[in-house]
Image: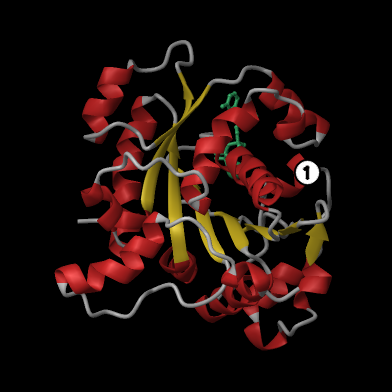
Amino acid sequence: MEIGLTEYLPTPITRDMVLDQLRPKLIGDAAPAQNDRGGHVVSICGAQGGAGATSVAINLALQLAETTKAKVALLDLHLQGGETAVMLGVRPGPGLRIALENPMRADTLFLERAAIEVNDRVCLISGDEELDAKLDITEAGVRHVLGLLRQRFNYVVVDVPVPFPASIYPVIQMSRHVLVLLEAEVTGLRNAHALRNAVTNIAGKDRVFTLLNRADRAGGLPRATIVKALGAEPDMIIPDLGKGMTQAVNLGVPALKHVSGLRRHLAPIVREITGVGAKKSAGWKRWLGL
Ligand SMILES: Nc1ncnc2c1ncn2[C@@H]1O[C@H](COP(=O)(O)OP(=O)(O)OP(=O)(O)O)[C@@H](O)[C@H]1O
Ligand SMILES: [Mg+2]
């Protein structure tokens, strides 16, 4: 399952391609590109608890695979109390913890042991460690696991714990897109600002996107307040999709199969990530991260 053909197929120009090719010439940034070869990493992080990070990570992974026909890994770095497996109705083993703690033990068989097939194209890599377990996740382990996944999958969608433990900084550094999710609440707004700064410090400002989830939810802050506090319109928006989202969690099925509107709202996010059908209206400054 090495990445092959897709790398050679002509694809529409994406923001990342423009960035990678032009920015060094335009602004004299001679630093080597942070993203070496391999699958495209997309990190999903919630600015507040329950912002919808896990729901977005799962359904985005599924829709990316469906739209692009590519192989997608869904990596859940919440090894204790992570919810991806519960939401997908599967039970993970100890493989991910072992690999993250001892990279030397994570050989090419790691994936066969740790990955759970969600469908033909999507695999879940997650753990289910006891809440009182003392984990010793190392940066080397995180780099190694991500490297293995990037060799075998075209996209790696990561459900990232917040605040970021230092050991997972490489995930943020290797991400081409970091989605910071918030709801229309004071807590989300406050934390989104701090989280965007943290991502920018680790990976650069052109990687971070604000996703307002459950927009227009009853009782939420008005749009104008949100825009003022963020200093800009959110980059992406998903409206409140009602009780079907929670029902899907309780049924252990992806919301994409249960909530009819979700696919339509994820489509612009998939387009931003893949560049397929991306809008050309984005300002050049934003495209170039200037
Ligand atoms: N757009 C939406 N409309 C309605 N319900 C939603 C929406 N997005 C997420 N939810 C629901 O909100 C709840 C919390 O979502 P989720 O578990 O994905 O958030 P999270 O950010 O991963 O939370 P945690 O901080 O616990 O990791 C779930 O019941 C989910 O179904
Ligand atoms: Mg979660």
Left or right of 138: which side holds 284?
A: left
Left or right of 267: which side holds 189?
A: left
**Height in image: 15 above or below 246?**
below
Residue drawn at point x = 44 percent, y = 60 percent? 176
Ligand 1, image quadrant it occupies = top right
Left or right of 118: which side holds 138?
A: left
Q: Amino acid at mark 1?
A: Leu
Q: Is residue 164 visible?
A: no
Residue drawn at point x = 41 percent, y = 40 percent? 279
Local crowd at mark 1 within 10 Å, few (<14), some, or many (≥20)? some
Q: Position of residue 13 (x, y in %)?
A: 42, 57
Residue closer to the observer: 122 or 217: 122
**Height in image: 158 above or below 259?**
below
Disc 1 within 8 angstroms of ligand 1 (CB): no
Q: Quadrant of residue 48?
A: top left
Q: Position of residue 268 (x, y in %)?
A: 50, 37
Q: Quadrant of the N terminus?
A: bottom right
**Height in image: 152 above or below 11?**
below
Residue, far left:
27
Could you tell me how many numbered marks the image carries? 1
Q: How is the image coloured?
A: secondary structure
Q: Position of residue 283 (x, y in %)?
A: 25, 44
Residue drawn at point x = 62 percent, y = 17 percent? 242
Q: Quadrant of residue 203?
A: bottom left
Residue, far bottom:
104
- Secondary element at tag 1: helix
Residue, far top:
218
- Residue at image mark 1: 88
Left or right of 7: which side holds 130?
A: right
Q: Quadrant of the C terminus?
A: bottom left
Q: Position of residue 223 (x, y in %)?
A: 32, 19
Q: Is residue 91 visible?
A: yes
